[in-house]
Every structure is written in structure tokens, then in C-alpha cells.
Amino acid sequence: MTRPQRVVVVFGTATEIGKTWFGAATITELVSHGVGVAARKPAQSFDPDDPHPTDAEVLAAATGEDPALVCPSHRWLRVALAPPMAADRLGLPPVLLADLVAEVEQSWADDASGPATRVGWVETVGGPRSPIAHDGDGVDLARALGAQHLALVADASLGTLNAVRSSLAVLEPLGVPVTVALNRFDAADALHVENLRWLRDLDGLDVVTSPEALATRVQEG
């Protein structure tokens, strides 16, 4: 497979915000419309005693890929800390940004699924400035991969405006379109509706409230 036609890098405004669930649902929607998706999680850290699937396994289930292709086996860090901290705790070599980028690019080049893959879906860890390597964070990863679209997954309730604005302050300098996705949005919740109005009407942001809508944005470019 050649490099995907469009590289989308996905952030959360914080850890446990639901970016993997929202991303997997968006991928499922894209695939249902005939869009090939190659999902990548350059590194993941997790509690090995947690019975839930890892992020790589959730994304792989959506794309039909092998979880070890989504995230290389040696990047499965079995400590629930940021990847570079987990590597330190486990006594592993430093996690370097250039290595993560090279592994993602090589995995796309080696993928035998064919040239029809239009979207490379790359999920970061935590928020935009959360370290994914000893020498780089999510913003650095997006820049190094030449991302063409960014998705920022946020909660829809209290703290949403500050979390979104703070994240965009470091994402917008990349000069790449950003779509804000409000996870767990409830149209019957007055606060959720008001947050949506503020972000769309007052801040002028591109905001969606469903994986289906995010899939449309990704297809539109």
C-alpha cells in the first residue's frame, strides 16, 4: 500500500475523554461507505489487569486490521503511564519520535491491503501536549506525519470550552483544519447545547456531535 491519501491525527482534550470510542465509531462509518482506513496508534500504555480491550484492539476491530499492525507489539507498554514514562518504568530504551514516525510510515508501506486506503487514522495519547515520546508530544507527531486533518475529541459538559480552547491554542499553529467532536453529546441537555452554540457561533469552530458527522468531515477534506 502506498501512503494513505489523507492522514487524520486524532487528539483528546484529556485522557479518558473517549477519543478511541469516537474514533472507532467514525472509522466504522467510513468503512461502511467504502472508504479504506488504516488505523495506527504509534504507542500505547495500559494497565495489564484491565479487562477491557486496548486502544489498538478497539481500532483494529473497526478497520479489520491486526492489532499488532495498528500498534507494533514492542510499543505495547504494560504500565498505565504516558509512553515515555512507561518505558522508563519498564527499563526499556527511550521512545523517540523519529522512530514512531518511521514505524507508522513503514507499516503503511508494507501493508498488503492495497492502494485503495484513503485515510490514515492516527491516534495520539491524552491531550495534544501529552508526551508520546521522550522528545515529542502529540503536536510534534502530527507535524512530523504531515497531518492533513485534525480531530479533537472533547466531552460535552462542564469544562468543555476551556478544554477545547486550550487544546486549539497549540493545534491551530499547525495550519491544518481541525474538527471538534463533542463526545456523549445529549441534545436534551441544556449545558451541552449551550457549549455547542458557544463553540460554533461565538468561536466559529467546526464542531460535530456524532461519529457520522465526523466521517463526513474527513471525506470532505
Image (cartoon, rainbow, N blue to C red):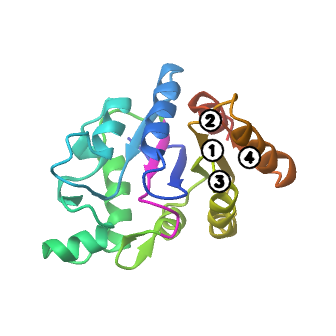
Of pointers 2 and 1, the one earlier in the residue sequence = 1
Please report the residue visible at 60 percent of the width from the left and 27 percent of the height from the top: 212
In screen coordinates, is 211 left or right of 100? right
Where the N terminus falls, by quadrant? top left
Q: CA distance from mark 2 to mark 4?
A: 10 Å
Of pointers 2 and 3, the one earlier in the residue sequence = 3
**Region of the chain picked out in magenta, as a range:** 118-129
The answer to whether mark 3 and mark 4 are in CB contact below 8 A is: yes
| Marker disc for residue 156 | 1
User: Circle 1 — which element?
Assistant: loop
Q: Is residue 109 visible?
A: yes
Of pointers 3 and 4, the one earlier in the residue sequence = 3
Q: Which x, y percent locates residue 72?
A: 23, 53
Q: Which residue lies under the disc numbered 3?
A: 160
Where the C terminus falls, by quadrant? top right
Q: Amino acid at mark 2?
A: Phe
Q: Which x, y percent locates residue 203?
A: 82, 55
Q: Is residue 128 magenta?
A: yes
Q: Which residue lies under the disc numbered 2?
A: 185
The answer to whether mark 4 and mark 1 are in CB contact below 8 A is: yes
Please report the residue visible at 83 percent of the width from the left and 51 percent of the height from the top: 204
Which residue is nearer to you in this view: 41 or 210? 210
The answer to whether mark 2 and mark 1 are in CB contact below 8 A is: yes
